[in-house]
Amino acid sequence: MKKLLVIMGSPRENGVCQELINQVRTYFLDCEIKLYDTYKMAPAPCTDCKYCEYHDGCSNKDLDVFFEDFEDADYIAFFTPVYNNFFPAPLKAVIDRFQRYYSARFKRGAKPPIKKPKRVGAVIASGSNARQCADYMVGTLRQAFTVLNGEFYARYYIPNTDTGKYTFNMVELQKFVHQLRGNE
């Protein structure tokens, strides 16, 4: 059975991102789905302590279970709002903790640092029209996953959530799912 890892970057349990997770989940009923809420995870920040340059893993053990699921996933889907033109702090902390894999690759020579390849996508919602910010966020993920044995395939952007003048575009949602799943 394939595995979908959902990474929730919003603090709102009943917000736009959660609604989109609910919609996307219906397309992955044949998969094992694990959801991680970055606000509930409360990840410690990377402090560049150098532990991962010499050891497998991280000196902080708070994300060990998350990273086991991360490595085992076939699909990874981020659901996040735009906060101050970028990812919310807890999600940014998780992304910063990918340092363990960069160190594995570039300091310890692990090629690739994660064995199982991944298909990656992001659903990004913003209070205003912040398409340029969403593009930058996607670029960050795309670059990160070049080292993490993943390829970024899918994005779905929803602007203007603060004004309530947004709609869920089912065509775009289905396109996102199709691109994330690929040709199975």
Image (cartoon, rainbow, N blue to C red):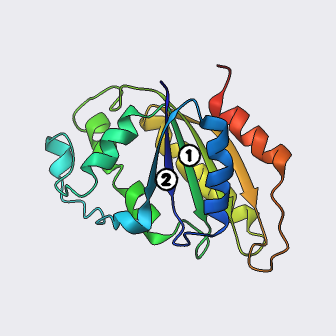
Task: State left or right for residue 24 relative to residue 109.
Answer: right
Out of 46 and 72, give the one closest to the viewer: 72
SS class, disc 2:
strand
Q: Quadrant of residue 28?
A: top right
SS class, disc 1:
strand
Marker disc for residue 7: 2
10 Å crowding of disc 2: few (<14), some (14-19), many (20+): many
Task: State left or right for residue 24 relative to residue 129.
Answer: left
**Residue at 73 percent of width and 68 percent of height:** 130
Q: Earlier in the sequence, mark 2 or mark 1?
A: 2
Expressed as whole percent of the image width and height from the top left, the position of residue 61 reads 19, 55
- Residue at the outermost top position: 184
Expressed as whole percent of the image width and height from the top left, the position of residue 16 reads 67, 66
10 Å crowding of disc 1: few (<14), some (14-19), many (20+): many
Q: Are marks 2 and 1 in contact (CB under 8 Å)?
A: yes
Three-letter code for the amino acid on which mark 1 is drawn? Ala
**Residue at 80 percent of width and 58 percent of height:** 168
Which quadrant of the figure contains the C terminus?
top right
The residue pinned by badge 1 equals 77
Image height of 68 relative to 112, above or below: below
The answer to whether residue 92 is visible is: no
